[in-house]
């Protein structure tokens, strides 16, 4: 059975939750591992946000009767979480506020996951037909394939050239967003 966009995005949610679980298990003193995990979470979350903004939310606006209201709320949550991620990318895990920011991000994302899985996803499934959801899943999967896999452009990359082409000095959140949305190419 083909994968639809809701199944795909739900899997993303589980993947992010798994990274959060690893972060919670990693001792605060292990700065290197915490940096690696938070960068991985940021890339995954930005990629997920772009997929939702480009494919899910336009469909939600179109098919769900009060979709505009739901989507506007989701977008403000994305914006909020992105601000927290930008603070995290600039903060070192050795700094005291890092943990505070990490807890804030986890709270914001868990709320986002609850909102979507309890409200937006079931309602979209009710109002949009399965073929539409599968077609959107295919498009979103294509966008996922172009996402960067390594957080730092200096690190050996499985996708050489992708992050390198983006402006140096730009933060991880913006670089990941540009790479995924194709704006940096
Ligand atoms: Fe989501």
Image (spheres, rainbow, N blue to C red):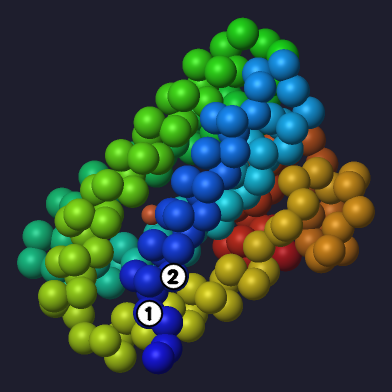
Q: Is residue 75 visible?
A: no
Quadrant for the N terminus, please: bottom left
Marks 2 and 1, how far apart at CA:
6 Å
The location of residue 103, given as percent across then percent down, is: 46, 24
Nearest the viewer among 92 and 13 is 13
State which quadrant residue 142 falls in.
bottom right
Q: Label 2, secondary structure: give it.
A: helix
The residue where tag 2 is placed is 8
The location of residue 123, given as percent across then percent down, is: 15, 66
Residue that appears at 74% across and 32% down: 33
For residue 182, above or below residue 142 = above
Residue 132, disc: none
The location of residue 46, given as percent across then percent down, is: 54, 50
| Circle count | 2
Quarter of the picture for ligand 1? bottom left
For residue 124, above or below residue 48 = below
Residue that appears at 78% across and 35% down: 169
Nearest the viewer among 133 and 54 is 133
State which quadrant residue 80 falls in.
top left
Quadrant for the C terminus, please: bottom right
Residue that appears at 20% across and 80% down: 128
- Local crowd size for mark 1, using a 10 Å CA cut-off: few (<14), some (14–19), many (≥20): some
Q: Label 1, secondary structure: give it.
A: loop
Are discs 2 and 1 less than 8 Å apart at CB? yes
- Is 18 left, or right, of 57 in this rendering? right
Q: Is residue 3 visible?
A: yes
For residue 53, above or below residue 2 = above
- Local crowd size for mark 2, using a 10 Å CA cut-off: few (<14), some (14–19), many (≥20): some
Residue that appears at 37% across and 34% down: 108
The location of residue 111, given as percent across then percent down, is: 30, 39
Query: Is the CB atom of the residue marked by disc 1 within 8 angstroms of ligand 1's nearest atom?
Result: no
The residue where tag 1 is placed is 4
């Amino acid at each position: 059975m083909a994968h639809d966009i809701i199944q795909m995005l739900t899997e993303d949610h589980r993947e992010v939750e798994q990274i959060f679980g690893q972060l919670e298990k990693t001792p605060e003193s292990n700065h290197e591992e915490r940096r690696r995990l938070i960068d991985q979470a940021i890339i995954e979350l930005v990629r997920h946000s772009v997929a939702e903004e480009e494919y899910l939310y336009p469909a939600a606006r179109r098919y769900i009767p009060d979709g505009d209201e739901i989507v506007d709320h989701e977008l403000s949550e994305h914006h909020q979480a992105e601000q927290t991620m930008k603070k995290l990318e600039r903060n070192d895990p050795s700094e005291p506020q890092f943990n505070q920011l990490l807890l804030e991000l986890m709270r914001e994302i868990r709320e986002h996951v609850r909102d979507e899985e309890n409200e937006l996803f079931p309602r979209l499934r009710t109002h949009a037909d399965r073929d539409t959801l599968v077609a959107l899943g295919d498009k979103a999967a294509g966008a996922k394939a172009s996402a960067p896999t390594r957080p730092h452009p200096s690190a050996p990359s499985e996708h050489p050239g992708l992050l390198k082409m983006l402006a140096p000095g730009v933060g991880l959140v913006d670089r990941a967003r540009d790479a995924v949305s194709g704006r940096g190419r």
